[in-house]
Amino acid sequence: MKIVYYEDDDILFIEFSKAPILRDESVNWNVNIGYTADGIGEMTILDAQKSGFYPLQIERVIADAA
């Protein structure tokens, strides 16, 4: 997985797979998803910081040992 943020353009690019993109789909005016044969290969988000998608907040859940 690869995550790149282009600060000058406020674009967030997330690559999940190096497999060839077979189909692109615009989910919203600022979110584009590239699909591979196995599922989502990449996401591009325009105005990422302005829209609240960047900086990323990753939640970590620790399983209770009880």
Image: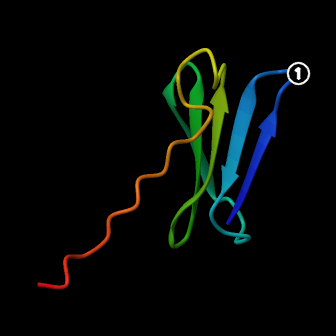
Question: Label 1 neighbourhood size at 10 Å, few (<14), some (14-19), many (20+)?
Answer: few
Eyeballing the image, is 34 above or below 17? Answer: above
Is 16 displayed left or right of 61 in the figure? right
Secondary structure beneath dot 1 equals: loop
Q: Quadrant of residue 25?
A: top right
Q: Nearer the viewer, residue 33 or 63?
A: 63
Please give the residue where the numbered disc 1 appears in the rendered image: 8
Q: Percent from the top left, x then y, of residue 31?
A: 56, 30
Q: Quadrant of the N terminus?
A: bottom right
**Residue found farthest to the left:** 66
Is 50 displayed left or right of 19 in the figure? left
Q: Quadrant of the C terminus?
A: bottom left
Q: Identify the residue at image location x=31%, y=71%.
A: 62
Q: Which amino acid type is marked by label 1?
A: Asp
Q: Identify the residue at image location x=71%, y=43%.
A: 13
Q: Identify the residue at image location x=55%, y=31%.
A: 53
Q: Percent from the top left, x then y, of residue 38?
A: 51, 73
Q: Nearer the viewer, residue 13 or 20?
A: 13
**Residue found farthest to the bottom:** 65
Is 29 displayed left or right of 19 in the figure? left
